[in-house]
Image (spheres, helix red, strand yellow):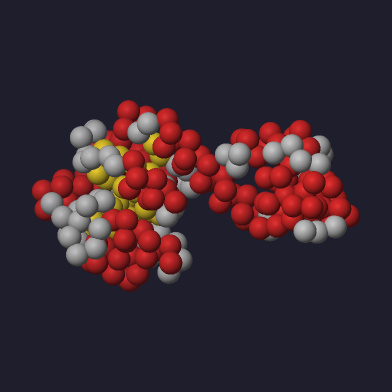
Amino acid sequence: MPITLVLADDHPLILDGMENLFQLEKDFKLVARCIDGEEALRAVRVHRPDVLVLDIRMPVRDGISVLREMKKEKLPTRAVLLTAALDEDELAEAVRLGVRGLVLKELAPKLLVQCIRQVHAGELWLEKRSVAGALEKLLRREAGKQEVARVLTPREVEIVHQVAAGLRNKEIAERLFIGEGTVKIHLHNIYQKLGVDSRLKLTRYAQEKGLI
C-alpha cells in the first residue's frame, strides 16, 4: 500500500515542487494539496492520509492551529512540519501536539522523502542541523511520556516520579494521601508492566524516557 499524503503550503511553487517530488516515488500517493490551514484540516478529515506535510505559517488557520484541532479530534494522521524558519516556542508547542518530523525548506528534497518514510514507520525525524539539542530532548521526552501513558495509569506515573525523586514508600504515601500498602501495590504493578525489579531500574527507565 502506498503512503498517502496531504501537502499544505501557501506557496504554489513549493506545492508544485513537492508534488513533482512525490510523483517520482512509487511508494507515495498524493490525495490532496492545500494552500491554507483550513483546507488542510478539511483534507485530513476527508482523506485520513497517513502523513500530512504542513507549513507552520499559513493563512486562515496556521499550522499550530491545525495540529491542535487534529489532536482534539483524535485524527490518526501523522504530521511533518516543513518550515522556512524556526521558532523554538512554536516548535515546542508542535511537539506537544504530536508532530513527528521536522524538515527545513532549505534542505535537500530527498531529506523530506526520508523523513516521511521514517515518520510513517512510527519513528521520529529530526534533521540535526535544523534544531537545537534542547528541542531534540523535548521530542524524546514527549515521545517517552506518550509511551509511558499507554502502559501506566496516571497514578502509577505519579509514583514513578516520586520514586525517581528518591522518596521512600512512606514519603510517597504521605504526599499522595494514600496508604503505604497502596504504594507497594502500585509499585508491584509498575514493576510488572515495565519489566523492572528495583527502584534503581525504575529510575533509569524514567530517565531514559525523559520523565525526570
187 relative position to 143: left or right? right
Residue at the spot 25% in from the left edge and 51% down from the top edge: 55
What percent of the width, then of the height, locates residue 156?
72, 54
Provide residue 172's location: percent of width, then percent of height. Answer: 77, 49
Q: Residue at coordinates 52% horizontally, 46% vertically from top-left?
A: 143
Residue 122 % position (x, y) = 48, 47
Q: Quadrant of the N terminus?
A: bottom left
Quadrant occupied by the C terminus: top right
The residue at 43%/33% (across/down) is: 134
Q: Position of residue 130 (x, y in %)?
A: 31, 32
Q: Where 76 falls versus 202 (above or below)?
A: below
Left/right of residue 117 with respect to residue 104 in the rendered view:
right
In the rendered image, the residue lying farthest to the right is: 181
Q: Quadrant of residue 25?
A: top left
Residue 171 showing in the rendered view:
yes
Q: Is residue 108 above or below residue 211?
A: above
- Asked where in the image residue 199 lies, by quadrant, the reply is top right
Dividing the picture into quadrants, the one containing residue 201 is top right
Tell me how many marks there are: 0
